[in-house]
Amino acid sequence: MQSDNHDWFREIGRDRIPLTDFDAVVMRRDPPLDNEYLTATWLLERAEAAGVRVFNRPRALRDHFEKVAIAEFPQFAPATLISRDVEQLQQFIDEHTDVILKPLDGMGGSQIFRPARRPEPQRDHRDADPRGARTIMAQRYLRKSSLATSAS
């Protein structure tokens, strides 16, 4: 065990080993859900078809995207909208006044945007994506103190 959390392994060499040589394969990869992620799931499907036991089934990884999965449990999540429609997002911001916006393809808190709270309806999510070119998640902002309240 290393005392430094960032120095917990050392690469000592590389070998190319076919997935079919393993008893099982576990897929765990952080987003973003990009072409590399999709390619990995396609390759794992081929390995699965060849008889490899694959945990976190490739199709399930694609079909059950973690950020959208909260839609299955709205009672445990703040008010949420997933959209790329500029007007729809603006209405959500106007209704909830204090929101956060995040891209579905980001990870680790990157690119999360909290529009300035203003009394007039001039807050605008277009600073996060000016063209509406990508789908984003808008959620009502929860202060830390409200998390304990809403959980009880």
Image (tube, rainbow, N blue to C red):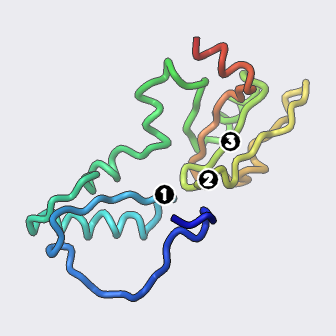
Secondary-structure class at tag 3 = strand
Residue 91 appears in the rendering: no
The answer to whether the residue labelled 1 contacts the one labelled 2, judged by CB atoms less than 8 Å apart, is yes
Q: Which residue is mark 1?
A: 30
Residue depicted at x 49% and y 42%: 67
Density class for disc 2 (Cα within 10 Å; few <14, some 14-19, many ≥20) is few
Label 2: which residue? Answer: 108
The residue closer to the viewer here, 113 or 83, is 113
Helix, strand or loop for disc 1? loop
Residue matched to label 3: 101
N-terminal of the pair, mark 1 or mark 2, is: 1
Nearer the observer: mark 3 or 1; the answer is: 1
Q: At label 3, which amino acid type do we have?
A: Leu
The quarter of the rendered structure image containing the C terminus is top right
Q: Nearer the viewer, residue 122 or 2?
A: 2
| Image vertical order of residue 125 relative to residue 147, above or below | below
- Compute the Cα span from label 3 to label 1: 19 Å
State the image coordinates of residue 90 (x, y, percent, origin top left): 72, 34
Q: Position of residue 73 (x, y in %)?
A: 44, 24
